[in-house]
Amino acid sequence: RRVLFRSFADLYLYNFVALFAALALFITPTFNDSWAKLSLAVAFLIWTFGSSISSWNSLTSIQLPSKITDYSYLLFYPIVLFGLSRALSINKRILPLEVFDTLIIALGLTSVIAGIFLRPAMIHLNGTNFEVFLSILYPIGDIVLVAITVAYSLLQKKSARIIFMLCGTSIFAQIGRAHV
């Protein structure tokens, strides 16, 4: 019974952090870029949704479709990359090609890198091609998030915002996948 309580506490508390971050972004009165605010909030909601289903499936016998988790995480990366680039960008006017550039970077770069590692991973990891691809894609996506945040932070003067974004992105990349 104690283990069951700890498991459900983990389910709720772990996923509450991302939900709280999304809600905080939605209600924050001061944010200099509404596209960044909306993108980051939606990305956190999508991640929370996928993470909650993943946690639920690992803790209960009533299983929800795991593909929902996979697609939630896949949607998370391009949306959060767009939001991060908008939040850290000096140019606050949204350009139509900016959305496409973000998608190309997020999906193209991570897919190419994951594709390079797919064949060796197929030898060492069990699962379908899609499952192995995703197991490679998630850490690569986290690395791309950190790399973009570092790149933007190097191009700007140091501020509390830059430091918090860099710390938050790094923490997410380090421990965000521990429960997946």
Image (cartoon, rainbow, N blue to C red):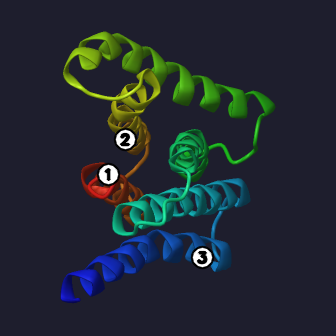
Find disc 1 in the rendering and name its residue.
177
Question: Which numbered disc, 1 or 2, marks the residue that appears first in the sequence?
Answer: 2
Element on which disc 3 rests? helix
Q: Position of residue 6 (x, y in %)?
A: 25, 82
Q: Amino acid at mark 2?
A: Asp
**Contact (Cβ within 8 Å) of mark 1 with mark 2:** yes
Question: Which numbered disc, 3 or 2, marks the residue that appears first in the sequence?
Answer: 3
Quarter-wise, where is residue 89 in the image? top right
Say above or below: 136 vs 123. below
Pick the front one: 95 or 128: 128
Find disc 2 in the rendering and name its residue.
142
Find disc 3 in the rendering and name its residue.
23
Element on which disc 1 rests? loop
Q: Amino acid at mark 1?
A: Arg
Pick the front one: 76 or 62: 62
How far is mark 1 from mark 2, CA to CA? 9 Å
Q: Residue at x 31, y 49 (%)?
A: 173
Quarter-wise, where is residue 131 in the image? top left
Question: Which numbered disc, 3 or 1, marks the residue that appears first in the sequence?
Answer: 3
Q: Residue at x 22, y 15 (%)?
A: 123
Say above or below: 166 vs 116. below
